[in-house]
Image: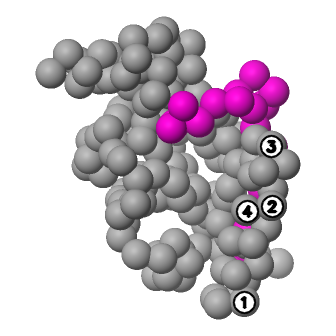
Amino acid sequence: MTKKCVRAIFPGSFDPITNGHLDVIERGMKLFDELIIAVGRSPVKNQLFSPEERVEMIDELIREKNMSNISVESFEGLTVEYATGKKADVILRGLRSLTDVQYEFQLAMTNRAVAGIETIFIMTSEQYGFTSSTLIREVASLGGDISNLIPNNVYERIKKHLKK
């Protein structure tokens, strides 16, 4: 009996990637043979970094942490179409709160109905349950200390970006 190679995508805007995202990635990489971090281009979100910059920062983290079964790339359009195009078996999502559950449930059901792709959820570790990229952008823009909420390479980029 041959083992099926399971490919998952972990989509998000990752603007910026947080320690909560990293927590889900590190735990997800143990569950799947291949994990693709899919950096989406959001037409409705105010962006701090371009998709290319976000891919670059995440790629630095992957190399730094020697995560061999993970890749990162950007995409446009519907996540479910991207997942289908990549022949992904599942979509990985992190959950922080009950609010996330309600929203993610709707997305998961829609993705299954549209493309037959399943969504697997990982609860974010307790220390990251309150963290969001939006909140981090807000706190950083007001001069707050976000250094313990994001990876070091991202923190340095944000400091440099906000000095402009």
Amino acid type at image mark 2: Gln
Residue in the picture at 81% in, 27% down: 126
> Residue beneath label 3, please?
97
> Residue beneath label 4, please?
104
Residue in the picture at 25% in, 21% down: 162
First along the sequence among labels 3 and 4: 3
Circle 1 packing at 10 Å, graded few (<14), some (14-19), many (20+), is: few
**Which quarter shows the N terminus?**
bottom right
Distance, label 1 to label 2, CA atoms, is 17 Å
Amino acid type at image mark 4: Glu
Relative image position of residue 97 (x, y in whole percent): 80, 43
First along the sequence among labels 3 and 1: 3
SS at mark 4?
helix
Marks 4 and 3: in contact by CB < 8 Å? no
Where residue 116 sits, quadrant-wise, is bottom right
Which portion, as a residue range, is magenta? 117-135
SS at mark 1?
helix
Relative image position of residue 65 (x, y in whole percent): 50, 28
Badge number at residue 162: none
> Residue beneath label 1, please?
113
**Image: 99 above or below 16:** below
The foreground one among 13 and 6 is: 13
> Residue beneath label 2, please?
102
